[in-house]
Image: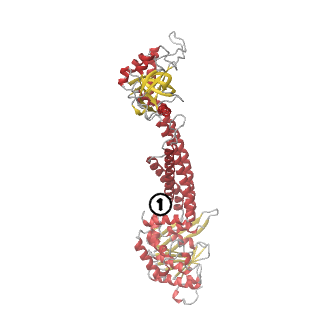
């Protein structure tokens, strides 16, 4: 599903910063992978490249068999819209839109009509127990609710991949456990998932843990999350 | 693309920033408002001045006698050239000339009952009514029969008429007998729109009558109408041709700047039009400059808006918004501000000028009190200006929104999302 070959990325600022130094990574369809590393290790940059939110300088990136390189903004938008669902640490909900409108937005960009859009968005909100919160604005929701809205928004287009950047970073441990449970269930339904985190507890809930250090993959650890006891605190 | 959702997004953005929207819009409204006021005022001035010769046949000519400046063929300088029937025959022989009317001028005193008034009496042909654009308010002008019969009939001006009626208490002057320099004339008409001589009245008699009475065959002034002279160049060439012919007839130097003065109504009015066109261009330049400051304001505000919305735009991009949809939504937002507020300014401006127009018409303002000539009439703009203003607004709206929109399209989604 995701195939990265020798990906290099340098930020050209006042001081050029070589953040990714030849990343090779394969993620198969349906896998649940986490990328771990200290801050500055390049894990977010890597996720952004996978999500076509950022470009890379060298190497090749194949997404669902398509080479993602020098795409036009239109093509990139198309891929993001159809193939990828994003979940962010800070939720990135649009503040002046209701939960329902936020979830329906990706469908708007697919040209789905208003009625169908709202029906579908409502289905996903219902699935995450947010039916009664549909008409609320993000600032009226708790952190966990916001993250569930953004998960609903990521899923509403039935993407092939979910990319989550520190999805529990802004949540308390109890809510984190709930969110992770949801993400695991989503993955179980067959959607490939890549989670960036710096928390061991979160990473240990995934089947494959990619350790990133100073822009290089240090090791890839196979993991069996079923050994974990979910009732325990994960932090 | 331009469906209900698209528009509701735009109007939502405008509503979220009410103060900003209104302040920005005000600059545009003000610009268009002032442009309309200025254009209307310019139009009013133009309408006023041109209305003074609107009733004249466009292409009329007037030749004045004058003294020469140069010695020529044994004649000394400063010789006064008087025109005669020979000049009339010469003019009538030219194919461009339609009808010729000499003017016999005779100053004098008009007496009616107890009342006397200084007048300028002019002997003319019937065609003079058209040449001078005289409006007949009552009765009739001189006709061919008067001319043939050398009838002692008189057309008096409105001021004289009003004055005589006021003093004598009569209801009409038509058919009354008046005396000019001791000779009796029957009043046949009252006219308006003649050349004014300050406090003096003006009246017209058949030129044949005055010729017989005063036994004059020389004229200070000859007027005539022409045909087929449509451009300034044709008129100027015609003036040169007439001048040469008259120079030969009266034996003055063709180089002489004086001798006779030839004045073309058309060249004059073209000249006047040129002045008004210049004023018009000036107004547009000022108006457009004002609009530009409005547009710069909108553009600035749009830039700030886009900056504020950078995060949102980043999120939209991550969710699959295409550049075109973002570009369009920002440009359309700017366009909506400029057109809505532009039209507010436009209609306010037109409304104000309509009211000014109504007040002026009701109060009879806009006329010069001394000469009775109009200087300011119907200060409004026509539909073409409205269409043009719309075009200007649309272009400026797009221009104002485009640069900020383009910037937001270019920025990478992740940079936009992380922007603080």
Give the camera-side residue of B97 and B315.
Answer: B97
CA neighbours of label 1 inside 10 A, class few (<14), some (14 to 19), many (20+): many
For residue A55, say whether it is visible.
no
Give the camera-side residue of B214 and A119.
Answer: B214
- Residue under numbered circle 1: B328
Kindly identify the residue that appears in the image at 52 percent across and 65 percent down.
Answer: B15
Expressed as whole percent of the image width and height from the top left, the position of residue B159 reads 49, 32
For residue B47, say whether it is visible.
yes
Which chain does the residue under circle 1 lie in?
B
Q: Which residue lies furthest to the right in this view?
A: A15
In the image, is residue A76 above or below residue B33? below
- In the rendered image, which quarter contains the C terminus of chain A? bottom right
Callout count: 1
Q: Is mark 1 on a helix, strand or loop?
A: helix
In the image, is residue A55 above or below residue B346? below
Expressed as whole percent of the image width and height from the top left, the position of residue A80 reads 47, 70
Give the camera-side residue of A139 and B327.
Answer: A139
- In the rendered image, which quarter contains the N terminus of chain A? bottom left
Kindly identify the residue that appears in the image at 53 percent across and 89 percent down.
Answer: A227
Give the camera-side residue of B294 and B350.
Answer: B350
């Amino acid at each position: 599903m995701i195939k990265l070959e020798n990906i290099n990325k340098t930020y050209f600022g006042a001081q050029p910063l070589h953040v990714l130094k030849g990343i090779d990574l394969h993620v198969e369809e349906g896998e649940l992978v986490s990328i771990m590393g200290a801050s500055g290790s390049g894990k977010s940059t890597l996720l952004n490249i996978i999500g076509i939110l950022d470009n890379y300088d060298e190497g090749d990136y194949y997404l669902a068999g398509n080479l993602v390189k020098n795409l036009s903004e239109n093509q990139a938008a198309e891929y993001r819209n159809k193939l990828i669902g994003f979940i962010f640490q800070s939720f990135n909900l649009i503040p002046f839109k209701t939960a329902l409108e936020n979830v329906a937005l990706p469908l708007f960009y697919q040209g789905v009509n208003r009625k169908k859009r709202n029906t579908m968005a409502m289905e996903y909100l219902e699935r995450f127990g947010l039916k009664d919160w549909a008409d609320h604005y993000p600032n009226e929701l708790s952190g966990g609710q916001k993250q569930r809205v953004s998960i609903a928004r990521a899923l509403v287009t039935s993407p092939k991949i979910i990319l989550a950047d520190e999805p529990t970073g802004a949540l308390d441990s109890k809510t984190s456990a709930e969110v992770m449970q949801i993400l695991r269930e989503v993955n179980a339904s067959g959607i490939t998932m890549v989670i960036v985190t710096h928390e061991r507890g979160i990473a240990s809930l995934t089947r494959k843990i990619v350790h990133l250090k100073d822009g290089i993959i240090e090791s890839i650890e196979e993991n069996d999350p079923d050994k974990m006891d979910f009732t325990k605190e994960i932090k | 693309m331009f469906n209900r959702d698209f528009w509701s997004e735009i109007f939502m953005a405008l509503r979220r920033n009410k103060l900003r929207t209104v302040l920005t819009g005000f600059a545009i409204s003000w610009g268009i408002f002032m442009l309309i006021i200025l254009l209307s005022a310019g139009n009013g001035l133009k309408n006023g001045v041109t209305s003074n010769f609107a009733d004249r046949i466009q292409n009329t000519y007037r030749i004045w006698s004058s003294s020469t400046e140069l010695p020529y063929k044994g004649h000394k300088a400063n010789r006064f050239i008087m025109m005669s029937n020979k000049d009339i025959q010469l003019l009538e022989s030219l194919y461009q000339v339609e009808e010729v009317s000499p003017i016999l001028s005779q100053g004098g005193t008009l007496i009616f009952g107890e009342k006397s008034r200084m007048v300028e009496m002019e002997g003319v042909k019937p065609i003079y009514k058209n040449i001078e654009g005289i409006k007949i308010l009552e009765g009739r002008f001189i006709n061919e029969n008067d001319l043939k019969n050398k009838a002692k009939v008189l057309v008096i001006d409105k001021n004289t008429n009003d004055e005589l009626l006021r003093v004598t208490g009569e209801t009409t002057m038509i058919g009354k007998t008046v005396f000019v320099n001791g000779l009796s004339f029957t009043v046949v008409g009252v006219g308006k729109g003649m050349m004014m001589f300050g406090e003096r009245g003006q009246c017209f008699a058949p030129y044949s009558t005055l010729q017989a009475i005063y036994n004059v065959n020389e004229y200070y002034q000859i007027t005539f109408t022409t045909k087929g002279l449509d451009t300034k160049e044709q008129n100027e060439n015609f003036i040169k041709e007439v001048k040469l012919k008259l120079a030969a007839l009266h034996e003055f130097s063709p180089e002489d700047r004086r001798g006779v003065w030839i004045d073309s109504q058309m060249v004059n009015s073209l000249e006047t039009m040129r002045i008004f066109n210049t004023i018009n261009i000036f107004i547009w330049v000022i108006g457009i400059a004002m609009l530009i400051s409005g547009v710069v304001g909108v553009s600035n505000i749009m830039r700030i808006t886009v900056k504020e919305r950078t995060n949102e735009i980043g999120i939209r991009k991550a969710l699959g918004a295409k550049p075109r949809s973002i570009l369009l939504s920002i440009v359309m937002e700017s366009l909506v501000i400029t057109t809505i507020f532009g039209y507010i300014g436009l209609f306010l401006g037109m409304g104000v000028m309509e009211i000014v127009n109504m007040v002026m018409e009701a109060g009879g303002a806009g006329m010069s009190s001394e000469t009775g000539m109009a200087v300011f009439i119907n200060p409004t703009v026509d539909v073409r200006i409205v269409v043009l203003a719309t075009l200007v607004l649309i272009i400026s709206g797009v221009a104002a929104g485009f640069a900020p929109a383009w910037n937001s399209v270019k920025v990478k989604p992740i940079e936009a999302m992380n922007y603080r």
